[in-house]
Amino acid sequence: MTIAAPIRSLYVHVPFCHTICGYCDFYSVVYDRGRITPLVGALLCELDQCGRRYAPALRTIYVGGGTPTTLPPNELSRLLTAVRSDVEFAGPISDRPAESAVGSVADRTCCEFTVEANPATVTPEIADVLMGCAVTRVSIGAQSFHPSELRVLDRLHAPPQVGQTVAICRRAGIPQVNLDLIFAIPGQTLESWLANLRQAVELGPDHLSCYGLTYEHGTPLYERLQRGQVRQADSELEAEMYEATIDTLAAAGYRQYEISNFAKPGCECRHNLVYWRNEQYLGVGPSAAGYVDAVRYRNVPDVAAYVHAVSAGRSPRVEEERRSLDQQARETAMLSLRLTDGLDRRTFAARFGRDATELFADAVRRHVSLGLLEVSDGAIRLTRRGLLLADSVISDFL
């Protein structure tokens, strides 16, 4: 088969968690030691199948979940070592000393390798595994530093464990750390949110992801909302929290490069940029999604069914949809507008044969007149006010 462009990115889904958070709608299951070895074996098998089919030359790897760091050290090492073997190195493989393999400094310069973790799941032993497998970035689900807010979210960790986890990662030598935070939690005030931001910044992360809480249909938190057990934050308060986030993090040296993401210079998440630029990536694991050769696919969201399919030599995919050129163009515009640099007009025209201001003339004209978009010779981007109404603006490009 012919692939339109080299596949440079890989996502691997590890669904195990010690508990299921009430707001989370990602596929996850409660930790079960007896299911780990079969799942890791199936992941390795699918990785091998993908390697044979697509011959990826990876520049970014993201192992998410779930909580991958719930895996025992030996199984985590087995998985990450296999994942890392598909990386394209800066020079020819033959130039590398045989003993350098996965731990060298040279390896780390050519591939961003992220693993998600929850506080208290990264022990010194786990951190050594991550470092030994050349992981360059750990993304920690802090969410809040207030016990009452953590209880609303069904989080198990205590606030001090966030800093302890960051310290363990730093001592192990892991180059970059991200913290995830959530605002607009029921009962949260602007003051408590700003306190969260201050405590996060004090830990010195290289990157911060700050998300407004969403109530996804089918989650326990959504059901509690429907029953009146929690109250959704006022939209004006949520907007105030978001603008305070932008200003507070800018003052602390973090550049906002996407609606919800802020980074120190050079520490942007390259893997997520692949998604926002609508580039190709492989998805491996139960419920993992991928986008290859204009086809979006999703694997079966069930550990047992996934292991059975892969072990039997069958594809674990349960959904596949080929995107037309027009659909690709619209999805690219929608995703690119999430970036503060916006949609690059020259890149878009080279890829799709039309200027975005022509293809989306009505939407661009309307939102420019409302002060939500700005257009330059090089890009179309959201204004500061447009960031607050991003969902409604972006939907007009689909």
Image: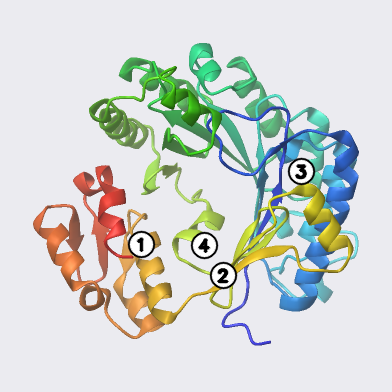
Residue 105 vs residue 349, the one in the foreground: 349
Mark 3 or mark 2, which has the lower sequence index? 3
What number is the disc on residue 334? 1
Q: Kindly report the distance in space between the C-alpha atoms of the residues bearing marks 4 and 2.
A: 7 Å
Residue 330 vs residue 339, the one in the foreground: 330
* Tag in front: 3 or 2: 2
Question: Is label 1 in a helix, a strand or a loop?
Answer: helix
Mark 1 or mark 2, which has the lower sequence index? 2
Q: Kindly report the distance in space between the C-alpha atoms of the residues bearing marks 3 and 4.
A: 24 Å
Question: Is label 3 in a helix, a strand or a loop?
Answer: helix
Q: In this view, does 273 lie above or below 331?
A: above
- Residue picked out by circle 3: 131
* Tag in front: 4 or 1: 1
- Residue picked out by circle 4: 274
Residue 328 on image: x %, y % = 43, 74
Q: Is residue 371 visible to us here?
A: yes
Residue type, mark 4 in image: Val
Residues tagged 4 and 2 counted as in contact (Cβ below 8 A):
yes
- Residue picked out by circle 2: 280
Residues tagged 3 and 2 counted as in contact (Cβ below 8 A):
no
Residue type, mark 3 in image: Met
Residue 220 on image: x %, y % = 55, 28
Q: Is 2 placed left or right of 94 in the picture?
A: left
The quarter holding residue 346 reads bottom left
Mark 3 or mark 1, which has the lower sequence index? 3
The quarter holding residue 176 reads top right
Residue type, mark 2 in image: Gln
Residue 288 on image: x %, y % = 65, 56
Near mark 4 (Cα within 10 A), the count class, few <14, some 14-19 or many ≥20, is some
Q: Is 250 placed left or right of 26 in the picture?
A: left
Q: Kindly report the distance in space between the C-alpha atoms of the residues bearing marks 1 and 2.
A: 16 Å
